[in-house]
Amino acid sequence: MSDPTLTAIQGVRTDVGALRAETAASIQALREDLSARLDTTVSRREHEAEVRRIDAESRATREAMATLESQADARLLAAHAAIEAGDAAVRARLEEVERKRGAALEAAEVRRREDRRYLASWMVGAVSAATAVTALVTRLSP
């Protein structure tokens, strides 16, 4: 003997409990879905930020390479000019050394000629003196 009102109230209570459980499950599912979406959004934002950072680094590297390449010709020309200046200095020094060497060889040749003339004049003088002494000895001998 059951009372139909109590049975109806009990049925409504059961339905409300089921609705509460279903609502709680739906809310939990929505929370999990929202958390997953937020995680995805955060991950996507982090990913996009990382992509922007990598793009900025890549752009900076490309710009640095372009600057380096554009300055390479100037550096090459400067190095070439420095090498040519060094070569010119070496050539000038070699010419100076050759000029001094030529002057020294010419001076040595002049000294040799003067030494030969001096030696020849002494030899002529010695022969003349020997001839005079021989002539004197020949006259004085009986």
Image (cartoon, helix red, strand yellow):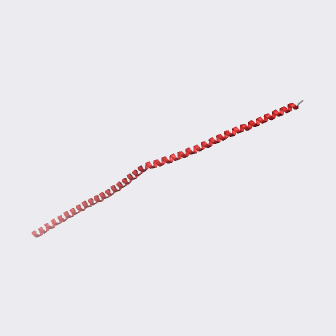
Residue 73 image point, x, y percent:
43, 48
Residue 1 seen anywhere in this rendered image of the structure = no
- Identify whether 141 is placed above or below 13: above
Q: Residue at x 62, y 43 (%)?
A: 100
Residue 130 image point, x, y percent:
81, 34
Q: Quadrant of the N terminus?
A: bottom left
Splitting the image into 4 quarters, where does residue 141 fall? Answer: top right
Residue 55 image point, x, y percent:
35, 54
Q: How many marks?
A: 0
Instruction: Using residue 90 as the reference point, say whether residue 77 is left or right of it.
Output: left
Splitting the image into 4 quarters, where does residue 139 fall? Answer: top right
Query: In the image shown, does 59 or 83 lie closer to the viewer?
Result: 83
Q: Quadrant of the C terminus?
A: top right
Residue 6 image point, x, y percent:
12, 69
Splitting the image into 4 quarters, where does residue 112 fall? Answer: top right
Q: Residue furthest top?
A: 142
- Identify whether 111 is placed above or below 1: above
Instruction: Using residue 11 as the reference point, say whether residue 129 is left or right of it.
Output: right
Q: Residue at x 65, y 42 (%)?
A: 104
Query: In the image shown, does 70 or 21 lie closer to the viewer?
Result: 70
Instruction: Using residue 75 as the reference point, say whether residue 21 is left or right of it.
Output: left
Q: Residue at x 56, y 45 (%)?
A: 92
Query: In the image shown, does 22 or 73 lie closer to the viewer?
Result: 73
- Identify whether 121 is placed above or below 85: above
Residue 63 seen anywhere in this rendered image of the structure = yes
Q: Residue at x 55, y 44 (%)?
A: 91
